Amino acid sequence: MTARRVLMVTESERLGAAAVASARSDGRLRRALDSDLIYSFCRSPVTVIAAVGTVLMIGSALLCPWIAPHNPFDLASLNILDATDPPAWVKGGSWSYPLGTDEQGRDMLSAILYGMRLSIAVGFAAVALAATFGVSLGLIAGFAGGWIDTLIMRIADVLLSFPAILVALLVDGVARSVLPRDQQDAIAIYVVVLAISVLPTVQFARTVRGSTLVERNREYVQAARIIGVHPALIAVRHILPNVLGPVLVIATINLALAIINEATLSFLGLGLPPTQPSLGTLIRVGQNYLFSGEWWMVLFPSATLAGLALAVNLLGDWLRDALNPKLR
C-alpha cells in the first residue's frame, strides 16, 4: 500500500511538472505572438506578401533537385533540337519546357531554379562573411579605442569612397591575376564571395563600432570591469548581444545587394563560370539572343532576380522600421 501511494505521488508530481512546463511554453508562445514585432508584421500587407514571396523563392531554390522538371547540368538529357523553344503558351512551345529552353536546349525553369539557388548561396555566404569580420572589427574598434579605432575607421573610410561594384571588380581582378588559370573556375565561387563581402564588412564595422561606443559606458559594463571580467569577455558576453539589432537589419538589406552584385559580376563575365550558371550568367547569355526573338531567355531570369531582390529589400525596410523605437 505504501509503495502504491508513493507511485501515485510520483505520478502526480510528474504530471504537475509536465503541466507547468506546458503552461510556460504556452505563455512564451502567447507573449511572442503578442509582441510588437509580430503585430507590426501582420499589420503590413506588403511585408506579408514580401515574406511569402521570399520564402517561396528560397524554398524552391533549396528544393530544386526535387521540384525542377529537368536537370540542366545533365548533358546526356539535353537535346540540341529543343534549343530556343518558346514558352508553353506560345505557338511552338511545349509543356515539357514551361518557360522555354535556352540555346543549349536546357529547360529555362530548371535553369532558373538552379541558378537562383547558387545566387542565394553566394549572397548568404557573402553576408555571413561580412557580418563575421565586420562585427569583430567594430567591437574591437569601439571597445579598444585609441589608435586601433583610428586605424580601422580610416581604412573603412577609404573603402567607402569607392562604389561597391568597383571594389568587387578590383578584388576579383586581383584574384584572377594571382591564381593559376586552371584553378580559377574551381574556386570562382569563393573569389566572388570574398569580392562581394568587402564593402558590407565596412558597413557592419561602422554600425557596431557606433553602438559599442555607447554601450561601453553603461553601468553593466563598468560593473563587469570592477569585478575583474576580462575585456574580451565583456565585449562578447555583454556588449555584443546589445548591438545585434542593427546588425540584423543591415544583414537583411545587404543580402539583396549581395545577390545583385553577384549577378552584376556574372553578367560582366567576371563572376561565376558558365559551368555554374547563376541568375546573372543566365541574363548575360539570354541578352545575346534578345534581338533575335528569344525574349524568354532574358526576361524570366531578370524577373526572378528583380522579384527576389525586391522581396528581400521590403523585408529589410520593414525590419528596420520595426526595430526603430522612435517609430513605434
Image: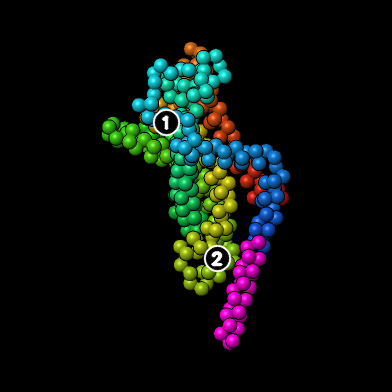
Specify whether residue 20 is in view.
yes
Q: Position of residue 27 (x, y in %)?
A: 67, 62
Bounds of the magenta segment: 1-26
Q: Amino acid at mark 1?
A: Asn
For label 2, the residue is: 221
Q: Position of residue 145 (x, y in %)?
A: 49, 56
Specify whether residue 141 is in view.
no
Q: Position of residue 101 (x, y in %)?
A: 47, 21
Q: Nearer the viewer, residue 134 or 299?
A: 299
Query: Is 229 left, or right, of 325 in this rendering?
Result: left
Pointer 1 local density, CA inside 10 Å: few below 14, some 14–19, many at least 20: some
Q: Nearer the viewer, residue 84 or 69?
A: 69
Q: Residue at x 70, y 55 (%)?
A: 34
Query: Is 186 left, or right, of 139 in this rendering?
Result: left
- The answer to if 10 sits in the magenta stretch is yes
User: What is the secondary structure assignment of the residue under circle 2?
Assistant: helix
Quarter of the figure with the N terminus? bottom right
Tally of numbered tags: 2
Q: Residue at x 59, y 63 (%)?
A: 218
For label 1, the residue is: 71
Pointer 2 local density, CA inside 10 Å: few below 14, some 14–19, many at least 20: some
Q: Amino acid at mark 2?
A: Val
Q: Residue at x 45, y 33 (%)?
A: 114
Q: Nearer the viewer, residue 187 or 227?
A: 187
Q: Is residue 210 above or below residue 2?
A: above
Q: Position of residue 232 (x, y in %)?
A: 45, 62
- The answer to if 229 sits in the magenta stretch is no
Q: Residue at x 37, y 29 (%)?
A: 74
Determine the residue located farthest toward the bottom in the rendered image: 2
Alpha carbons under labels 2 and 1: distance apart: 56 Å
Which mark lies nearer to you, 2 or 1?
A: 1
User: What is the secondary structure assignment of the residue under circle 1?
Assistant: loop
